[in-house]
Image (cartoon, rainbow, N blue to C red):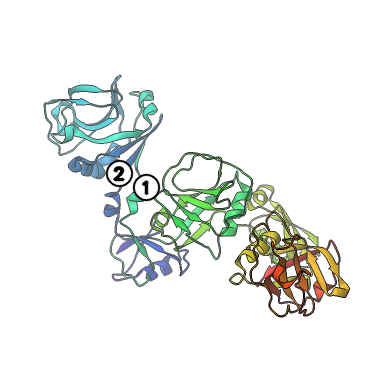
Amino acid sequence: MLVKVNGEEIDLPEKSTIKDAIEKTNAPYNPKSIISLIKGTKEFEQNITKYKIKTPKGNIIIELVSNASELTDLWRNSYLKFENKKIRWTTSNEIAAGPIVTCLTPSTEEFRYRKGDVILSLSGFSNESTHLIIFKEDSTGVYGVPGINQGVFAKVVGGKRTLNDLTSDDRIVEIEGVIERRSVTDSSNISDLNTILSEGNQIFTYVLVEPNQDSPQSVEHLFSLIEDDTIKVDYESNSFIGFYRMEGLGKDSEHSTMRKRGSVTLRNTGKGIGRIYIYREDRVQSPAHTIVGFVRSGMELIDIANTGDFITVKTDPERIMAMSMTQKEAKEFLAIQNIEQIREGVLDDDALVVGQDPTTTIDILKEKKVRTMGIVKDNLVSVNIYDEDAPRSSLYFKKVTNLIEKPIGTLKIHFAVANMKISIFEGNSKEAKGLVPENTPKDKVYSGTLGITNMSRKNVGLIGVRFEDNSEYGPTAEPFDGTNIVGKITTDFEVLAKLKDGDMVYLKEN
């Protein structure tokens, strides 16, 4: 039997499952993600109500009416016959294209038509000369239409200016269905890979996003949102689905344009800054939204996703991130993409890459070279972050260190006090606003514990670590009630104990 997987047609034995189809095509898929299953092309096309008529002068969008099923069914089965047909005539009131052969029976009645009406007209009262007529103005006449809704099967909803530009030298280049969310509402949201397939089934396992070359910083924000090739839906509506894990992390405004169906945007200001949206329906341009990318395939998954669902997402091009590789691994990784590596810092093959310049994938691809900053591996600090016990503090810590966006973060030592066995790191007082007390120490702070000064003290946002146990003060030298415990260092923290004011610490999350 023939089925399609992400648009690729394959032949499978009878009673094959979704799992069989995925394995045969090696389709991108994360086991916790949803799958879209469409029963067949015919069922899918019955839900399409808009069609794009492409001409040399532009596109015309028509929408089928709901009260002429015999005509709309005929259109769905015959519209491809109008492709490459010439514009037979144009007047001040109408344009006509065709002819094609249909099984319609003409009438001789005179009818009145409205601007934007689309009819099937049997020229010369012959079904072998069926024309597509679109009215540019209100008109009255005998058009040999069938006795069904005066021959009206659709209305023009877009491209009215194109109608006025067409001449008898033009033709219909192509006609395609306009897929909207309601076009796929009959498809199934599947998670059971043992679901048995039938002839003509279509499966979609992932969404492919093409990043916007004009929004390099915002594209990195999208890359940071994607974990293990998946994103979790935090909100869904008829117009869009939203992803809020990076909420609060703002980016400067970049490229903005109309938010068409399939557009991926980043909220760059106001309430919800840092949220990512993918649009199910067209929406007007907004300066508060940067266009991050465009869905090139897999909208079927966007249309059926519900709040709490995971979606497998791939990007083309993929993110170029050398951080956390060795200098040698980075060279090999970059060479595959014909990108020159320029080593800085520790240059040895086994040195750990903790920074790259340019920082964005788009800029690296443009320059075709990247500087990779290396350090001795043993100087990297590993930390456990207490996301559940201290959610606000954890988010703040990840923002300040940039671990929320990159695999390796940084902290700058504000001051180190050797005799007190403590180091204090620079924070961000603006980001620390609202850092309420949480996960405060009880009887003792143990060595290697990371703490943050909460909003009950004037130095809110400072981050600190102690190198020995203390029963009176937290890692930022504040009393316990002014300290939020955010994590613990799991590597040898003697590396930190040797550092001085102004030194940079590189760290990763376990």
Examine the image and state in which quarter residue 404 appears: bottom right
Q: CA distance from mark 2 to mark 1?
A: 9 Å
Q: Give me the residue at 53% from left, 57% from top.
A: 244
> Amino acid type of disc 2?
Thr
- The residue singled out by tag 2 in the image is 49
- The residue singled out by tag 1 in the image is 180
Is 245 situated left or right of 179 in this image? right
Is 247 situated left or right of 486 in this image? left
Q: Which of the image's four quarters has the C terminus?
A: bottom right
**Residue 275 screen position, x and y as percent:** 54, 53
In the displayed structure, 295 sits above or below 100; it is below
> Amino acid type of disc 1?
Glu
Q: Residue furthest right?
A: 419
Q: Are marks 2 and 1 in contact (CB under 8 Å)?
A: yes
Q: Which of the image's four quarters has the N terminus?
A: bottom left
Secondary structure under the numbered disc 1 in the rendered image: loop
In the displayed structure, 120 sits above or below 381; it is above
Q: Which mark is residue 380?
A: none
Is 444 situated left or right of 23 in this image? right
